Amino acid sequence: MPKKDIIAVDIDEVLYPFLKEFVADHNLKFKTNLKVENFSTYEFEDSLGINRRKSIQRIYDFSSKTDQINPEPIKDSKDAILKIAKFYDLVIITSRHPQYQDITVKWLNRHFKNVFKSVHLIGYHKIIQNPVYKSDICLAIGAKHIIDDSLDNILDCAKKGINGILFGDYPWNQGNLNKFKNITRLKKWTDVLNYFGIN
Ligand SMILES: [Mg+2]
């Protein structure tokens, strides 16, 4: 059988509704009135009105219980991922901190059992001493495509020849993509299926 092409898939906001769950938890815990639609950047401190160190701490505190919260995957992602996996090798590349490997895999196993060939947690490059970028992993494993909601990640990958699928139409991932031939914005998982010609 010929080797399948590899697609790298992000987790948060692509498979896992991280911000929605984070906001709900934060509002309860800190009596705030945050709304997902007000996050115009994915730097949470911008919306939380606290410094980066505190913001990261709150993200980490929340991250440590992401498997207990156990939300359903983002709409249509499960069905789409299972279908795509018949034709492509799927690999997870996430900016979650490596310390959350176990709980991340636990959630993936619950909803996407045996689908992903490998799971790479690389941490958030802006706060890591020797950062690894998603494009580094894509090049190392030979991924041809990446599905990610971060415009920064997609731009970096696209510049290195990886085909970028900017997932979702989110306040934090707006921008003009016209000059990039190898970037496509796809707003939902059914669009991703169409893009790959899978029904
Ligand atoms: Mg993401």
Image (tube, grey):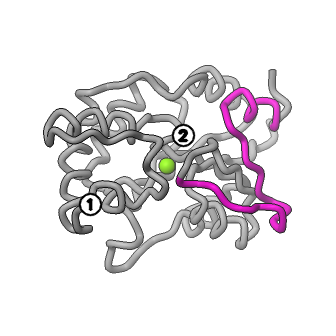
Q: Secondary structure at mark 2?
A: loop
Is label 1 in contact with label 2 (beta carbons under 8 Å)?
Answer: no
Please give the name of the residue rendered at 23% of the width and 35% of the height, measured from the top-left corner. Answer: 25
Depth check: 95 or 116 in front?
Answer: 95
* Percent of width and height locating residue 99: 25, 53
From mark 1 to mark 2, how far is it between C-alphas? 25 Å
Please give the name of the residue rendered at 14% of the width and 38% of the height, measured from the top-left corner. Answer: 29
User: Which three-letter amino acid code belongs to the residue tagged 1?
Assistant: Gly
User: What crowding class fits label 1: few (fewer than 14 Cα within 10 Å), some (14-19), or many (20 or more)?
Assistant: few
Quarter of the N terminus within the rendering: top right
Quarter of the C terminus within the rendering: top right
* Percent of width and height locating residue 77: 58, 27
The reply, left or right, for residue 101 in relation to residue 79 is left
Depth check: 120 or 177 in front?
Answer: 177
The answer to whether one can see residue 67 in this image is yes
Q: Which label lies toward us, 1 or 2?
A: 1
The yes-or-no answer for disc 2 within 8 Å of ligand 1 is yes
User: Which residue is label 2 attached to?
Assistant: 14
Please give the name of the residue rendered at 16% of the width and 38% of the height, measured from the top-left corner. Answer: 31
Depth check: 111 or 70 in front?
Answer: 70
Identify the mark at residue 49; answer none if there is no mark: 1
Please give the name of the residue rendered at 76% of the width and 57% of the height, measured from the top-left corner. Answer: 183
The answer to whether one can see residue 113 in this image is no
What range is drawn magenta here?
172-195
Identify the mark at residue 132; answer none if there is no mark: none
